Amino acid sequence: MEDKNLSRLNKATKVEVPELNEDIITNATAKKTKPNLVRFTSVAAAAALALTFGIGQLTPKQPLIQLADQAQGAKSTVQGGLEGNKMAGDSYMMAIFDYSAAENLSKEMQNGHIYQIEVAGTASSIVRKVAAAIGLDGKETYEAEWDTATISGSELRDGYAIETLTAQGGGTGSWYYWNAIEAGINNDPAGVPVTDAEAKAAAAKLFTATGFEVSPADIVVSRDDYGLSANAELKVNGMGSGLTWSMHWNGNGTVDSIYGNSVKLVDRGEFDTVSASESVSRINKFGYWASVSTTFSSNTGTGRDYNEPQPKVEIDNATLTNGVIYDAKGNAWIVPAFALSSKTNGFVGGVIALVDGIIEIPEAPEVMPMDTEVSSR
């Protein structure tokens, strides 16, 4: 008898998922997502549950995602997003540490959803929408090679625009605003004339106007030597996604930078993952790294020893979460990932959690040995 789930899964790897109407999306998300899933302001920005599969699915006959090889890495990283998330070719780490899985890590397989990230608009439409929200007027230019649109303010310094806003048409539809004249002035976090409550309210209002609907309660404020930041993260199924929005004030209380994304999510189904214990072996494997929520990086550990040529590190914590990766065409995906850490070294990084066969990972580039011969000249 034909396996209908497998048939639908294979179909998902070959055809584009159709858009759904608002009623279907509303009903589907009400049943399939947790209450604290961040919602968007329009149907285009909602998580479209286009395909649903049972728990513990088989892997497709052909990969659902094809990662970029080393030759594609440089340009694809730019196409993937202005925030600089790494492609497979860039995320390869040499085996500096000897990692092992602690006995407490689970050896049971789990499951998680794959979400295809689609850009909510074009580079031009995104840059215009964000510019309207910020209140930036100026000339728009477009670079077809990189699919980026830029609006530059009319006020100049040394022949260059003081205010610029650039949006990316690929990857996560990322955008970045920079106010050069105010950046770096009186950077005193204690003296920033903006309260946490004011920063949260302003950031929530701006992010919502650009298409990412959040409330002040969703905003996290931090202060450092450069001023004050108000940050928010897209949450999927109650977990951080690795996609962030940020608004920064300098010591004078002036907004000098803002960045964000313009995305809509398509649920491509639920898939099996390796166990937490098995995921540790992927730390030093080419192509398995994923960008996870920055909240994990706060774990700095109790101290590490760099005196040994290859210190042994025992990974004793593996949290199944969401991770962002980019495919060979620069398209972004949210996939199940493990955030790995140890008591001594703290947060190590995120690795793809999916079982092999769902993502096609290119061969690792050949690593040439360093020439250590000392010249007699």
Image (cartoon, rainbow, N blue to C red):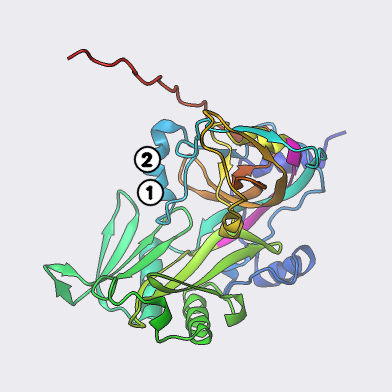
The residue wearing badge 1 is 78
Q: Is residue 33 above or below residue 211?
A: above
Q: Measuring 45% from the left and 64% from the top, which residue is drawn there?
A: 121
Whole-angstrom CA distance, mark 2 to mark 1, is: 7 Å
The answer, for residue 15, to whether it is visible in the render is no
As helix, strand or loop, the secondary structure at mark 1 comes to helix
Magenta range is 264-277
Closer to us: 126 or 6:
126
Q: Are marks 2 and 1 in contact (CB under 8 Å)?
A: yes
Would residue 142 be found to the left or right of residue 31 on screen?
Answer: left
- Give the vertical position of 251 relative to 38 (above or below): below
x and y percent of residue 165 in the render?
Answer: 32, 68
Three-letter amino acid code at disc 1?
Val
Secondary structure at numbered mark 2: helix
Q: Is residue 374 visible?
A: yes
Q: List x then y, in percent, for residue 218.
A: 60, 75
> Residue 245 — which label?
none
Identify the residue shown where x is 33% and y is 57%.
Answer: 148
